């Protein structure tokens, strides 16, 4: 059912952006797709805008005529601070300014569990837990969550911050037996965030209905989405081919996994 005239997807050339291009097509007459690299296989309902999110004029022009934004652009993992500063921090500011100036009232933001990566797996966190980023990448996610909160409180722009764990076609390692987000559930969360009657400023932990769920999502219940997939069909094969993780290792204890052990990017050879 068509709900929008035009949705903008940033990061549209990426793995999740590619899923969004297909999954959100029924919601809008037009999909404006953005990345800083060429996007392949442009469809008849798509409009491609190739630009860097760090370019304020380009982003301002790109957001004109848009009804809602799925903001999945930015640095996708840990990296040099200068890259994160331009792409994620400045780039997200430009997105929110474009939304404010053009009257766009809803954004779905690809946040991450790495904004809270130094919370323990057994702490059962909820949406109000304090930030504990595990990397500079995680810090950038905290920044955009704070930015989106400001733009809701002050200018009424609604945002769903999806703290995504591990979204792949199927789990890739033993940790993903609890952190996995199927593509179907990923699209379910985004669609719910775009179509719910009111979202205000919502933080939701985006994972499938796995047997272990180290978070409490009750404060996002108004989105009206319940994940449908889980990892039990993958468990036996995964446990047979992968060793049990050291239970005392930081990457096992904390929600951020291997990110908690990553060195500062400036210290890498």
Image: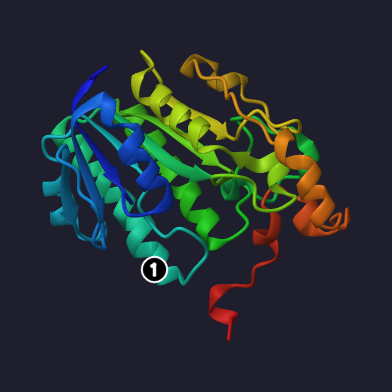
Foreground of the two, 123 or 183: 183
Total numbered badges shown on the rendered structure: 1
Estimate the x, y position of residue 54 in percent, counting from the top left. 26, 60
Residue 99 left/right relative to 216: left
Residue at 14% x, 55% y: name it.
Answer: 58
Estimate the x, y position of residue 225 in percent, counting from the top left. 51, 19
Q: Quadrant of residue 197?
A: top left
- In the rendered image, the quadrant that contains the C terminus is bottom right
The correct choice, above or below, for 29 with respect to 173 in the image is above
Residue 160 left/right relative to 116: left
Foreground of the two, 26 or 106: 26
Residue at 54% x, 45% y: name it.
Answer: 169
Residue 149 left/right relative to 36: right
Residue 17 left/right relative to 95: right
Specify how the rendered protein is coloured.
Answer: rainbow
**Which residue bears the numbered disc 1?**
83
Q: Answer few, some or many: residues within 10 Å of disc 1's Cα (few below 14, many 20 plus, some between 14 and 19).
A: some
- In the rendered image, the quadrant that contains the N terminus is top left
Estimate the x, y position of residue 33 in percent, counting from the top left. 23, 46
Estimate the x, y position of residue 201 in percent, counting from the top left. 43, 27
Label 1 sits on a secondary structure element that is helix
The correct choice, above or below, for 158 with respect to 144 in the image is above
């Amino acid at each position: 059912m068509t709900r929008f005239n035009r949705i903008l997807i940033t990061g549209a050339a990426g793995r999740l952006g590619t899923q969004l291009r297909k999954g959100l097509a029924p919601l809008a007459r037009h999909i404006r797709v953005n990345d800083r690299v060429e996007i392949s296989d442009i469809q008849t309902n798509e409009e491609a805008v190739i630009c860097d999110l760090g370019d304020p004029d380009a982003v301002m022009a790109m957001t004109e005529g848009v009804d809602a934004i799925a903001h999945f652009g930015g640095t996708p993992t840990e990296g040099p601070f200068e890259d994160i500063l331009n792409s994620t921090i400045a780039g997200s500011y430009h997105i929110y300014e474009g939304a404010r100036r053009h009257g766009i009232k809803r954004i779905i933001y690809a946040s991450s569990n790495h904004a809270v990566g130094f919370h323990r797996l057994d702490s059962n966190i909820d949406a109000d837990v304090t930030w504990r980023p595990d990397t500079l990448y995680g810090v950038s996610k905290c920044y955009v969550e704070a930015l989106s909160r400001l733009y809701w409180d002050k200018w009424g722009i609604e945002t769903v911050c999806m703290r995504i764990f591990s979204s792949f076609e199927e789990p890739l390692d033993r940790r993903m037996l609890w952190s996995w987000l199927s593509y179907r559930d990923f699209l379910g969360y985004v669609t719910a965030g775009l179509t719910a009657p009111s979202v205000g400023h919502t933080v939701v932990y985006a994972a499938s209905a796995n047997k272990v769920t180290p978070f409490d999502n009750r404060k996002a219940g108004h989105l009206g989405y319940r994940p449908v997939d889980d990892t039990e069909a993958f468990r036996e094969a995964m446990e047979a081919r992968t060793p049990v993780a050291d239970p005392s290792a930081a990457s096992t204890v904390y929600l951020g996994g291997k990110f908690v052990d990553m060195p500062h990017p400036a210290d890498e050879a």
